[in-house]
Amino acid sequence: MSLQERLAQAKNRAQNDGAPVEKPADPTAPPTPPPPPPDGEPRDAEAEAEAAAETEAEAQEQHLAEEAAHARREHDRLAQLRRRIHEGLVRALGPQLYDESVDETELERRVRDELRKALEQETTPLSAHDRKRLVSDTLDDILYNGPIEPYLRDDTVTEVMVNGYDAVYVERDGRLQRTPTTFLDDAHLRRTIEKIVGRVGRRIDESQPYVDARLPDGSRVNAIVPPVSVDGPSLTIRKFARDPYTMSDLVEFGSVSKEAATFLRKCVEGSVNVVVSGGTGAGKTTLLNALSGFIPAGERIVTIEDAAELQLQQPHVLRLEYRPPNIEGRGEVTIRDLVRNALRMRPDRIVVGEVRGGETLDMLQAMNTGHDGSITTAHANSPRDSLSRLETMVLMAGVDLPVRAIREQIAAAVQVIAHVERLRDGTRRITKVSELVGMEGDIITLQDVYAFDYDAGMDEDGRFLGTLRPTGIRPSVSRRVKDQGIDLPAELFDTAPAAASR
């Protein structure tokens, strides 16, 4: 008898007897889950643990939300108090804050006295921690650079970036980090920017909405405000070490190998013209500063910069700096003007912080007319790209020269290119040291003397394991250096030690 017939018979009997029909189990159907336990019976341990975890997560989330709300209330309360005290100090001290005849120590004493009086008159309850923080923040606002002052004092911070009044980032160890620091509002950030650029004789307003400047310690400042900065004022400060890094420091950091550092030192001592190439923030100025330390002390050096950053230790140094136009658009002194003027100052070497326009032509002419050993930097993605960049910048001088003539000038003027990069792991490394060996047809011939070993891979922390290794090519510049009485040992270019160390 089939299954359907048995079901029909059971249904008929149930209808006749009035009893419920129990449907036989279908062997092909999935098993029916057990019914939930009635109230009072023990629940499954796994379900109970999941429910407890959900309850704990909800409680923790609520606790964090309450803490955040409390922190916002405290921040707003302290911000309002700081604003009131700041305005009161400005009214009380007035012109004294900008009087250059007042000693900085004396001005700080007066500010502290007024601040103490202001706090005594306040009825807002403050803990010892909040009082100390309020005093520190107010002093930074009045006397220094506002909320970012602690990061400017911090030697581990290499760059401070303010994207808006409530978004402050810093760079540590080559990596960006967001900080909890905030300004009160856009107006507070704008006042801080105006104070910073005002101290160095620059201005920023709607008619001149951006500015490049440098702080007294050499740090580079860029600020930009509305209308060109859509989301409010923005500030970027690139710091430089109080004690400039030497080539020994760069070797210790792993930025360059000992052999490549020795080669570059002997090139500078032997009056070889060097171009440092790299991207923004790659460390071009740091390497330029380290290389300039090898220039013999008895030579006359003229440095030319957009913003004076180089810290040469030699006694015979003349520093020239670009001057922007005044409010009437007059009085600008360009880098090209300074390079031309430097040629009349009897320099042994010319060091240009960066070529970025028509001054490149004058720099190449200087390198080709007796100013051997000159050094400069240029933005580029590789040594080969730097040649194209130099060629393009020569054309920006407005002189109608054939491309071949420009390339011949470059090939004759530049002997070595050191290329620096900021790698993915945040480190800054010299990745290539290349030599210009002349021209083949219309193409400048370039060969790598040292190259970074990317094939070494990365460690578990994501840091590159490779180093700058010799390619085995002995550079033709060796003869030029030897003519200056400086020897370049063959061991500097030997690949055998590199192979043995793998």
Image (tube, helix red, strand yellow):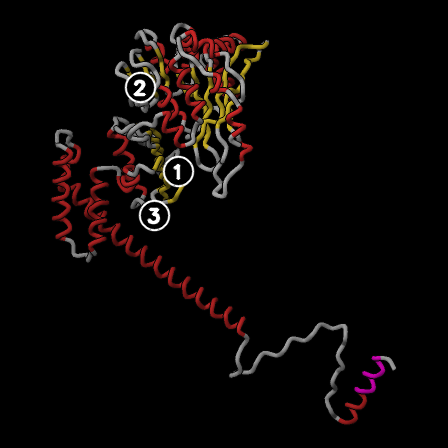
In this orientation, which residue lies closer to the viewer: 35 or 10?
Answer: 35
Measured as percent of width and height from the top left, residue 442 is found at 58, 10
What is the spatial separation of the Cα atoms under label 2 and label 1, in whole angstroms?
30 Å
Residue picked out by circle 2: 321
Q: Is residue 389 visible?
A: no
Instruction: Look at 31% across and 36% down and name the residue there.
Output: 155
Q: Which three-letter amino acid code belongs to the residue tagged 1?
A: Asp
Q: Earlier in the sequence, mark 2 or mark 1?
A: 1
Circle number at residue 343: none
In this orientation, which residue lies closer to the viewer: 121 or 403?
Answer: 403
Say which element carries label 1: loop
Instruction: Look at 20% across and 44% down and name the residue there.
Output: 86
Dividing the picture into quadrants, the one containing residue 241 is top left
What are the residue bounds of the magenta stretch? 3-10
Classify mark 3: residues with Cα within 10 Å, few (<14), some (14-19) or many (20+).
Answer: few
Q: Earlier in the sequence, mark 2 or mark 3?
A: 3
In this orientation, which residue lies closer to the viewer: 436 or 25?
Answer: 436
The quadrant of the image that shows the N terminus is: bottom right
Residue picked out by circle 1: 173
Say which element carries label 2: strand
As drawn, 119 above or below 39:
above
Instruction: Look at 28% across and 53% down and name the residue there.
Output: 76
Q: Which three-letter amino acid code belongs to the residue tagged 3?
A: Pro
Circle number at residue 180: 3
Q: Earlier in the sequence, mark 3 or mark 1?
A: 1
What is the spatial separation of the Cα atoms under label 3 and label 1, in whole angstroms?
19 Å
Mark whose residue sits in front, 3 or 1:
1
Left or right of 102? Residue 219 is right
What is the spatial separation of the Cα atoms under label 2 and label 3, in whole angstroms?
36 Å
Measured as percent of width and height from the top left, residue 355 is found at 41, 18
